[in-house]
Image (spheres, grey):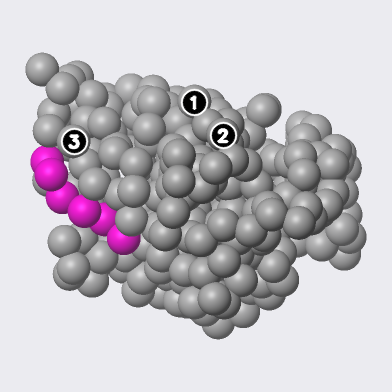
């Protein structure tokens, strides 16, 4: 199922508060009662047209976004680094999360803002010390993310918190697919229509069960938390006003534009 979070406009007649729904192949949204990650998938009798609403980030983590760095060998190589022996993780605050077609804000203190297309895991239950062979039990579904990075600040700081933690630096969407099975699907990132990244998610160094086991050995994950699984080679800067689109077969496409640099 494609789970969407959306804001209806006045023509939808459903009020102004964000809602959740199931998007079907006819671009109709079956409205759900409550947040399905927390309260389960409970359909109502209401339906709306996709064209009449604005899609939002399908989840806003109440806790955190956990990211895996250098999880593709070709990306580690382009960064001049060796392949890690175990997952390298870092956290983006939940205030970085925005939705499809929202604007990535270029901060005034950065000279270079990069895209990083990634497969994202949506956690569905409170979990700690999850073994790899049970990782599937805590996954609600999958979506697409852009691990936006102020590359110059990353190099300057020697660590990643500030460079990856600005507001709007984690676009997510367009929906959560609960039936997605990771395999040989490609991550394809385009910048103003030009392909910049194209790699199979099967090329990840650490696979999803390993990632979940490693992260939960250190910290508790909560429903709605996101795990970004790493980016392949081809990262690069997004010019002011550019549009970046990340696509994964079965998960759709996530597009965002970049603002002019804040003065």
Q: Position of residue 16 (x, y in %)?
A: 53, 31
Is 216 positioned to the left or the right of 130 in the image?
A: left
Residue plotted at (29% across, 39% down): 103
Residue 7 magenta-drawn?
no
For disc 1, the marked residue is 95
Classify mark 2: helix, strand or loop. Answer: loop
* Quarter of the image with the N terminus in it: bottom right
Q: Is residue 89 visible?
A: no
Dots 3, 1 in contact, CB < 8 A: no
Q: Position of residue 25 (x, y in %)?
A: 57, 77
Residue 242 magenta-drawn?
yes
Residue toward you, 51 or 78: 51
Q: Which residues are magenta?
A: 240-245
Disc 3 residue crowd, few under 14, some 14–19, many 20+, Cα 10 Å: some
Separation of disc 3 and disc 1 at Cα?
18 Å
Above or below, 159 against 89 in this view is above
Above or below, 112 against 82 in this view is above
């Amino acid at each position: 199922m494609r789970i969407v979070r959306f804001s209806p406009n006045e023509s939808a007649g459903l009020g102004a508060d964000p809602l959740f729904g199931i998007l079907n192949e006819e671009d109709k949204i079956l409205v759900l009662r409550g947040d399905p990650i927390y309260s389960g998938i409970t359909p109502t009798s209401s339906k709306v047209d996709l064209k009449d609403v604005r899609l939002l980030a399908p989840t806003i983590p109440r806790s955190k976004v956990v990211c895996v760095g250098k999880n593709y060998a070709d990306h580690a190589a382009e960064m001049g680094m060796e392949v890690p022996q175990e997952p390298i993780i870092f956290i983006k605050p939940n205030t970085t999360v925005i939705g499809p077609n929202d604007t990535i804000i270029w901060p005034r203190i950065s000279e270079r803002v990069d895209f990083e297309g990634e497969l994202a895991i949506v956690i569905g239950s409170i979990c700690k010390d999850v073994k790899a062979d049970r990782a599937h039990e805590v996954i609600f579904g999958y979506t697409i993310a852009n691990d936006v990075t102020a590359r110059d600040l990353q190099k300057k700081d020697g660590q990643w918190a500030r460079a990856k933690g600005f507001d709007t630096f984690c676009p997510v969407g367009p929906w959560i697919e609960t039936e997605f099975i990771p395999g040989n699907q490609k991550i394809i990132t385009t910048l103003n229509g030009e392909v910049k990244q194209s790699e199979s998610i099967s090329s990840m160094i650490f696979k999803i069960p390993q990632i979940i086991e490693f992260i939960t050995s250190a910290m508790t994950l909560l429903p709605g938390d996101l795990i970004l699984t790493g980016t392949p080679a081809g990262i690069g800067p997004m010019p002011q006003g550019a549009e970046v689109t990340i696509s994964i077969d079965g998960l759709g496409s996530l597009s965002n534009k970049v603002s002019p640099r804040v003065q």
